[in-house]
Structure formats: structure tokens, C-alpha cells
Amino acid sequence: MSRKYFGTDGVRGTVGSSPMTPDFVLRLGYAAGKVLSGRVKNPAVLIGKDTRISGYMLESALEAGFSAAGVDVHMCGPIPTPAVAYLTRALRLSAGVVISASHNPYPDNGIKIFSGDGFKLPDEAELLIEAEMEQPMACNHAAKLGKVWRVDDAGGRYIEFCKSTFPTQLDLRGLRLVVDCAHGAAYNVAPHVFHELGADVTSIGVKPDGLNINDQTGATAPAALRQQVLDRQADLGIGLDGDADRVVIIDASGRLYDGDQLLYAVARHRASKGKVSGVAGTLMTNLAFENAMRRLGIPFGRAAVGDRYVLEMMRERGWELGGENSGHIICLDKHTTGDGIVSALQVLHAVRETRASLAELTADLVMFPQVLVNVKVPRGFDWRQHSGIGKAQAEAERALNGRGRVLLRPSGTEPVLRVMVEGEPKEAIESAANSIAAAVRSAAGA
């Protein structure tokens, strides 16, 4: 059964348009609360958010919905998505809710929910919530309404948790870091983590105004971070996105390392200690990464795109490492979800313990060129029903002649079709990607 509202990463959209309206979020909170009430005694949830101005409105709507359903609410204010997952588990609560649209611009927002164990809500639970939303909304008797508390030390608790994932025998003294928080949820958390571990930290993207989240800053716009690294002659730059669940790193030369390269550095370091049971990637993972895992003798699998599917594969196969080239990296021995700060610390662990640079750690990972074109399409657009797109894809695959691969997939969070072509030479894959994208635009009426 398909979900009506929940996508690959919760519910997301432009604020003021369905489904990101106050009345919808109110009903969502009430429905989620009723589902929780039927599963546990004395249910209680944690609510955190990023720095978007719409977070105030949606936070109030969620709080009212949960309270009407008889669920107690613990409010955290602005805090990274992975912090909500951690605190939900640490405080023994029934669920954790994040108000964030991650790397999207400020007009968008979203709702994602974690179970009490700190993992993202499974599909069946989301289906139960959607079914409950089809029922009329009511309100508990006044004596059975949920109460609301403010968690004043949420940031401090999470800072200590992040630090605990770094080896106690190591520190970051002597390391010059630039940390870019994208004017997002980590603005008052991430700099403290790296500073308290000993690094000399320069912070950028730490002045949120409700409108500037991800605006020319952070993991999805690393130019500002690169310039700061070069200007300050820093050793490394760490770029987070708006809710701090993904990370990119830039070295002293200005070279950017994406999720595949960072995951490789961590996997290679752990493999040298015999501590890697397997690694999960996605359909978008660079072919060079798969070949590198084979050379290291590490089992590798490709999940559907989306960190929830990477996590599902990891849990099914008993693996501890997985991730996406976008910068979502999951280390299940450290956390239950992708965490940009924790992931950066795992990379820094490898750098400090081996005394090698990031370039040296990834020297034998020679990435295949990839071209990704995002084509705007109407919501619900099914590219498989258009023969022109299929023809363009087939022609591109013939032109590559076994030297690459083609992947088309709809975004789980935006009305776009992603066209990815990987292989060599670069000119061939650029031509292939542009030909397919043109066919998509024609079919979509763009």
C-alpha cells in the first residue's frame, strides 16, 4: 500500500501549500498521537526543529495536535535532526519529531518522525498515521490532555554525545578547522563539539535569521566554505546542511570530498583493523566505490536512494557502515541515523590515528565522472510511460558501450526527475545526460 503524505524522508513541501499548512500539521500531530496512544502507556514525544521561520508556526500546530491526543510533549527548539533521534532514545520517550526540510531553501519545511528507539519511523507506522488522519479529529477531555515541557539542556546533552563517539585517547589539538553550519540547526552545537575536542575552530553560517538557511552556504553550497579554508589556511573545512544530518569536507588545497569519498576513508580505516562487516550504498554510489570495496574484500550492496533504505539494508544484513554520495553517512555503532557531526568525527578519527591526510586516505579511490541533471517535472510524473525518454536512455546506454551506467529516478522530496550518467569519457556522459534531460523536458511539457 502506497503512502499518501509520507515520502522517503517524512512529509515535506512549501509552507502555505498542501501539505505544509497549519491545519494539516495539527491533524498530523493528533493522528500520530492517537497511534502512539494505542501502542504505549503514557506516551510522550520530543519535538525539535531547524532555524526556518515557519518552524515556530508548525511547532505550535504539532504541539496542539499531540496535546489534544493526550500525548506529553518535550520541546527542544532549534537542534539537529540526529540530536532528536539521540535524545528521544536517551530520554526514553515514545517518539521524536523533527520540523525541517533539510537542505531545501527556507520557504519549504517538513515533518519527520523517529521511533522511541531512535530509528526513523517504519513504513507501517506511517501508514497507520495516514489512516488515522482520514478520521474526524477530536480532542481528549481536559483532564487527559498532554502536558508540555521545555528541554533546556538539549544542546549540551547532544554535544556530549557527539564527543563520546570520538576516541578518548585522541584529540583535535593543533588542527585548524572551518565549520559551516548553513545558518541551520547546528549553529550553536557543531562549533562547540570540535572546539571542545581541541581544534582551533572558525565558524561560518552561524547567524540564522529564519530566512537564510542553506542560502549560499553549507554542504549543498560549499563555495563559501572552500574560500574560508583557503583564506585562513585551515587544515580542513566541515560543511553541514540545514538540519546537520549530512556532511562534506574540504581539505587545505580546496578539494571537496563527498559522501562516497568520506565513507571510503572511514571504511578503509576500519578495514585495517578488521572491523567492517559490510557497507551499504545506493544506486547513486559511484562505481569506483563499489570496485574499491571489492579490492578491500568488503561486502557491498546498493539500496534504493534515501538514507532510510540504506539503513534498512544495513540492519537486514548486520552491517555497521553505509551512506550516500550526498553526504548522509550512517555509522550504526555510533548512532541510529545519519549524523553530519558524528560522521565528520569518524573521518577525523581516521586522519588523526593514521596521521595521513584525507587525500592520502582516499588516494586509491579514483572516482568515475558523474553528471547529474535535475529536471523539473509535474508532481506524480511517471517518466516510464513516455517512449521518448526510454528511447533517449537506450541511445545513451548504447553510446556508452559498457563504459558507464544511466540512472533515472524521481526525487523523494522535490518535483524533479534526477538524470544521472556515470562513466568515461566525461564528454560522452555529459552528452548522454543532456540528451536524456531534453527528452524529459519535452515529455513533461517544460
Image: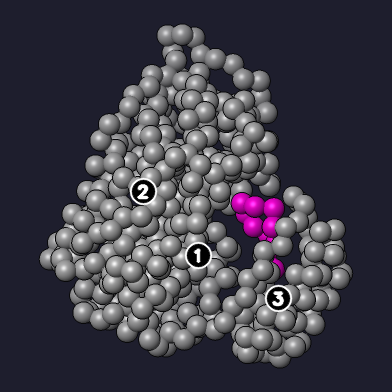
Q: Nearer the viewer, mark 3 or mark 2?
A: 2
Q: Is residue 416 magenta?
A: yes
Look at label 3 and name its amino acid.
Ala
Vertical side of 288 occupied by 316: above or below: above
Kind of residue indicated by mark 1:
Ser
Q: Secondary structure at mark 1?
A: loop
Q: Is residue 157 magenta?
A: no
Local packing at callout 2 (Cα closer than 10 Å; few below 14, some 14-19, many 20+) is many
Q: N-terminal of the two: label 2 or label 1? A: 2
| Mark 3 or mark 1: whose residue is earlier in sequence | 1
The answer to whether one can see residue 211 in this image is: yes
Residue 8 to residue 137: above or below: below
Quarter placement of the C terminus: bottom right
The residue that appears at 40% across and 26% down in the rendered structure is: 73
Residue visible at 54% across and 15% down in the picture:
139
Residue under label 3, please give it.
433
Residue 429, by quadrant, is: bottom right
Q: Residue at x 65, y 77 (%)?
A: 421
Q: How far apart in space, not on screen, are marks 3 and 1 (Cα)?
A: 19 Å
The answer to whether residue 385 shows anywhere in this view is: no
Upstream in sequence: badge 3 or badge 2: 2
Mark 3 nearby-residue class (10 Å; few <14, some 14–19, many ≥20):
many
Q: Amino acid at mark 2?
A: Val
Q: Residue furthest left?
A: 169
- What span is colored magenta in the figure? 408-417
Residue 318 position within the rendered picture, expressed as x and y whole percent measured from the top left: 40, 64
Marks 2 and 1 sit apart, C-alpha to C-alpha, by 22 Å
Q: Which mark is residue 206?
A: 2
Tell which of 279 and 356 is nearer to you: 356
Res 326 label: 1
